[in-house]
Image: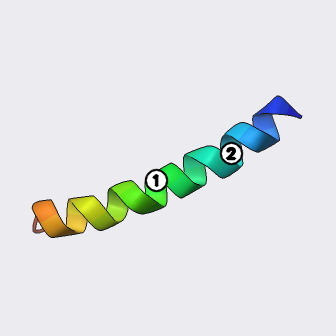
Amino acid sequence: NWGGGNKLIFGKGTHLQVKLSKCAIPW
């Protein structure tokens, strides 16, 4: 299932983005 794989990759990417956002943007 390509959608399932995309979900996993997107989830990991989002996790990293959240960490970077917390460091860069004081939300």
Give the residue type that dot 1 points to. Answer: Thr
Q: Position of residue 21 (x, y in %)?
A: 23, 59
Of the 4 image quadrants, the one containing the C terminus is bottom left
Callout 2: 10 Å neighbours few (<14), some, many (20+)?
few
**Percent x, y for residue 22?**
22, 68
Residue at 78% x, 34% y is 3
In the displayed structure, would residue 4 be above or below residue 17? above
Quadrant where the N terminus sits is: top right
Tell me if I can see residue 24 in this picture. yes
Cα gap from disc 2 to disc 1, whole angstroms = 10 Å
Residue 27 in view of the camera: no
Extreme top residue here? 2
Helix or strand or loop: what does disc 2 sit on? helix
23 relative position to 5: left or right: left
Rendered residue at 49%/50% (across/down) = 13
Q: Which residue is mark 2?
A: 7
* Residue 7 x, y percent position in the rendering: 68, 45
Residue identified by numbered label 1 = 14
Q: Which mark is residue 3?
A: none
